[in-house]
Every structure is written in structure tokens, then in C-alpha cells.
């Protein structure tokens, strides 16, 4: 259902100009991605202000423009339909907060150091089996992505699933103030962005702010294997639905699991068991799906319908994407990396079927602060235990911290250091043989997909 211009003015305190329409539906901050009838929010960018592209947005079908400063005009001087506000970035958040209050859907928030996008995708898939569901696209989860995700949610949704990301203290609390979740799930606590959080306790305090935002009438979902289970549970004033892959006393727990195949059977509070085939390997993915399943079931989704919802399911982005080319199997897991996710990927890779050699092409992990060297070395020691045939380590931290620790832990292993992904790509033809399997993993800024592409 459309948003009326009166609602937008009330939520943002804006002023109308150029005869804006009575309503709009959906929002965008990129003039090239505006949908017909949507709101184009013109924000200050790194190199230019979005108002410079207002005419293009209207030409592309946007119903109106929201901008700070003066009204906007077409090249011929014709006034464009717009609403002026004091700060368009803040107004976008205010509009999302106001729109959220009009939604009748059960709204779920998902966060975590790693696995939040996967958990969100699993939960959205499960809930679609129970009713109309709107969800964050990809990992659009920051102070711009979350408001846009909310504004693009269908007003008649039965469920909404939104992802919340953070790399600085206080961001989750701010996002939760916009989201006002009815329930929440935390996928994991790890060293991601620890440069800014200082410690795992600091990370838990940040992610736990989402739990704090859930009212007593709602619920939170948390794994007993979470590194800060006790602290996070204490942050929730709502009921905490506990899950576990190892403790059969948890209300939702795995009865059996085959991480290599991405299959597991879960038992619910009533003892009913459900077999789930999530389509991606790894214990960490099973944990994410278990959390999502518990949330969906608590929201009323049918267990068998959840299992059926996974038919044809796939995770977005570069998450364990398998491709075979010239007799070589490539596993693109280059969407991002932190110590926990890289170690989990390597353990999974070590068990992955392979006719030839296993070759891991690994890039630097960013935002680890003063502990960057220590955490790269710890990851190297974990990698050495996996028995990978060849490691190609790309980046300064891989050369200075990872490689020495890897050599020390596995003196006879083969490791090659290179400056970056592009150099690794140039090196690969001399290394690869038919039957080899290659894993690509590194922080987003390393662009490890270049090695394959």
C-alpha cells in the first residue's frame, strides 16, 4: 500500500514543493535504481550530492524527491515534485521509523559478527511458507540500507525480516530504534570489526543492543554455542528461545547433522523432528539455519512447510558458490571474511570432495585493529590443521603474520605469498591442474573473486 504525502511530511517535518503526488511506494537513494512511483532520497555522497541527479530520478519514474536545501528543478527550470527537509539522511531514517509503525507484520531483526545475512535469508525463506514476507535484500543493513529496506517492505506483509549490521559501537542501538523489532536473532559473536569494539565482550554489547530493543511481549533466539551466550541472554527482557547443535536439552536442537552435505534433523520443543536440506555445507550454516528455523516456528510457521521452502534455495552473493571450469572446481566464498568465518570455511573446505589437490587462496582480513597480526597468525595455525595442499596468501597481513605462523605450524606445507588478488590470479595458471579444487576467501576489500573472474 502506498505512503501518503501527508504521512511523509508528518514523519520528516518536510515542506512540499513543485506539486508532489498524493502518495509514493518504495524508496531509493540511487537515481539509477528508482522504481516507478517511488521516493528518491537525495543524500550527500562522497563526491556529489544526490540532488544533482534529481531530474534523472524523476525521468526514471520516481514520484518525488526528498532533499535537504533548496527545491530542485529540471534543466529547463520546471519545478520538480519534491519535499525539502533539514537533513535528508536523518529524514530517511525518520520516514522509515514512521512507516515501520504502520506495519502490521511481525518484524524480526537479525544481527551477528558472521552469518547474519545467511540467517536472515533462511528465516525469510521459512516465513514465506507461512505468509507474505518482506526482507532485506542482500546485506543492505546499515544506517541507509535498513531504512530503505523498511520503506520498501510491503505494507500488507505478514512478516518482515531485516538485517542490522555494525562496525562501530552504538550503531545497532540506533538501527534498533528505527526497526522496533518484535523478535530478534543473533547468529554469532566473533572478532569481526574488533578494531572498533575492542573485545568479544564489546562486540556482544553492541550486537546485544538488538535484544534490548525487543519488548517483553516478543522473543529472542540464541544458540547455546554462542561465545557470549550468558551475556546476551541477560540483555533480553523478552523470552529467549534457545537452540543448540550439541545440547539436547535446548528447546530446538539438532538430532543429527551432516555438515559436508548441508543436511540436518532438528527436534522442536514438542519433540517433533524435521529434516532440513539447506543446500550449502558447513556447521556454521547449519547453526544459522537452526536459529532461523527456531524463529520461524516460534512465529507460527509449519515445520514441514519450512523444509519444503528450502527446495531450490540458495544464499545470495559469493557464499560457497561452486563453479567448474577447465577441470578445476572453484568455490567462491569471497563475500567477506573475519577470523571465525575464514577458519570455518577452511575446516569445511578440508572435508569437501576433491579429486586432485585442495588450494586455498586467502586474502587479508580487515578491521581487526591492533590484534590484526595475532588474529591472522591464529587463523594460520587453524589452517595448518586442515591439511590444505597449497595456500596462496594475498596481502600484507597474510605475508607478515599469516605466512610465518603457517610455516611454523606446518613446516612441510606449501604456501606462496603475493601482494594482492590480481597477482594471485596471474600465478594460478602455473599452479592449477585438472581435478584441483580452489577456495577463495578474504575481506571484501581484497576482491578475491578477481582470482577466478
Image (spheres, grey):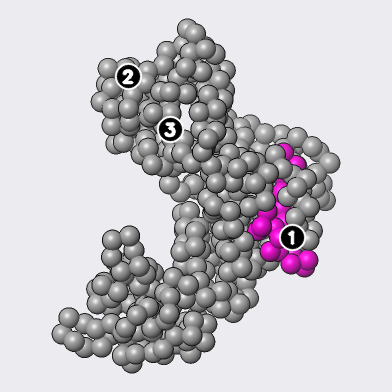
Residue sticking out furthest to the front: 370
Q: Nearer the viewer, residue 158 or 111?
A: 111
Tell me the tag on residue 364.
3
- Residue shown at 28% from the left, 22% from the top: 427
- Residue shown at 27% from the left, 17% from the top: 430
Residue 410, position as x, y percentages in the image: 52, 11
| N-term-proximal mark, 3 vs 2 | 3
Element marked by disc 1 = strand
Q: Which portion, as a residue range, is magenta?
A: 208-225
Image side of residue 216 versus residue 295, left or right: right
209 part of magenta stretch: yes
Image side of residue 319 versus residue 56, left or right: right
Tell me the tag on residue 219.
1
Which of the image's four quarters has the C terminus? top left
Residue 235, position as x, y percentages in the image: 75, 55
Q: Nearer the viewer, residue 18 or 358?
A: 18
Image side of residue 23 versus residue 308, left or right: left
Is residue 54 visible in the rendered image? The answer is: yes
- The CA span between labels 3 and 1 is 37 Å
- The CA span between labels 3 and 2 is 22 Å
State the count of labels: 3
Which residue matches tag 2?
432
Q: Nearer the viewer, residue 418 or 22?
A: 418
Amino acid at each position: 500500500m502506498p505512503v501518503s504525502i501527508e504521512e511523509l511530511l508528518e514523519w520528516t517535518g518536510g515542506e512540499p514543493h513543485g506539486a508532489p503526488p498524493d502518495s509514493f511506494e518504495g524508496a531509493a537513494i540511487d537515481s539509477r535504481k528508482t522504481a516507478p512511483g517511488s521516493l528518491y532520497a537525495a543524500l550527500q555522497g562522497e563526491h556529489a550530492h544526490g540532488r544533482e541527479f534529481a531530474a534523472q530520478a524523476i525521468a526514471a519514474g520516481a514520484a518525488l524527491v526528498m532533499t535537504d536545501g533548496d527545491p530542485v528543478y529540471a534543466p529547463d527550470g520546471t519545478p520538480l515534485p519534491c519535499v525539502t527537509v533539514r537533513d535528508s539522511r536523518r529524514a530517511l531514517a525518520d520516514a522509515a521509523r514512521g512507516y515501520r509503525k504502520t506495519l502490521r507484520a511481525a518484524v524480526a531483526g537479525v544481527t551477528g559478527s558472521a552469518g547474519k545475512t545467511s540467517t536472515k535469508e533462511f528465516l525469510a525463506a521459512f516465513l514465506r511458507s507461512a505468509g507474505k514476507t518482506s526482507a532485506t535484500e542482500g546485506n543492505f543493513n546499515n544506517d541507509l540500507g535498513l531504512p530503505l529496506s523498511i520503506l520498501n517492505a510491503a505494507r500488507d506483509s505478514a512478516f518482515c525480516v531485516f538485517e542490522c549490521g555494525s562496525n562501530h559501537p552504538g550503531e545497532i542501538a540506533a538501527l534498533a530504534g528505527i526497526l522496533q523489532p518484535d523478535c530478534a536473532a543473533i547468529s554469532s559473536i566473533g572478532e569481526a570489526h574488533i578494531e572498533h569494539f575492542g573485545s568479544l565482550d564489546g562486540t556482544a554489547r553492541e550486537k546485544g543492543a538488538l535484544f534490548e530493543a525487543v519488548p517483553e511481549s516478543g522473543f529472542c533466539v540464541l544458540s547455546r554455542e554462542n561465545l557470549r551466550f550468558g551475556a546476551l541472554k541477560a540483555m533480553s527482557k523478552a523470552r529467549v528461545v534457545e537452540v543448540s547443535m550439541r545440547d539436547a536439552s535446548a528447546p530446538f536442537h539438532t538430532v543429527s547433522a551432516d555438515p559436508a552435505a548441508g543436511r540436518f534433523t532438528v527436534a522442536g520443543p514438542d519433540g517433533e523432528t524435521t529434516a532440513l536440506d539447506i543446500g550449502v555445507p558447513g556447521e556454521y550454516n547449519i547453526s544459522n539455519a537452526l536459529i532461523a528455523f527456531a524463529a520461524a516456528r516460534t512465529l507460527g510457521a509449519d515445520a514441514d512447510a519450512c523444509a519444503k521452502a528450502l527446495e531450490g534455495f540458495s544464499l545470495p552473493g559469493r557464499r560457497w558458490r561452486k563453479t567448474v571450469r577447465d577441470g578445476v572446481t572453484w568455490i567462491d566464498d569471497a563475500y567477506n571474511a573475519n577470523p571465525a568465518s575464514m577458519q570455518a570455511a577452511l575446516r569445511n573446505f578440508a572435508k569437501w570432495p576433491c579429486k586432485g589437490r585442495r588450494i586455498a587462496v586467502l586474502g587479508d582480513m580487515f578491521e581487526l585493529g591492533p590484534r590484526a597480526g595475532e588474529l591472522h597468525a591464529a587463523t594460520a595455525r587453524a589452517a595448518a590443521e586442515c591439511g590444505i595442499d597449497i595456500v596462496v596468501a594475498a596481502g600484507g597481513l597474510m605475508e607478515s603474520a599469516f605466512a610465518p605462523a603457517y610455516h611454523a605450524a606446518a613446516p612441510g606445507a606449501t604456501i606462496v605469498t603475493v601482494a594482492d588478488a590480481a597477482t594471485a590470479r596471474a600465478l594460478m595458471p602455473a599452479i592449477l591442474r585438472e581435478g584441483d579444487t580452489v577456495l577463495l576467501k578474504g575481506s571484501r576489500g581484497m576482491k578475491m573473486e578477481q582470482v577466478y573472474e
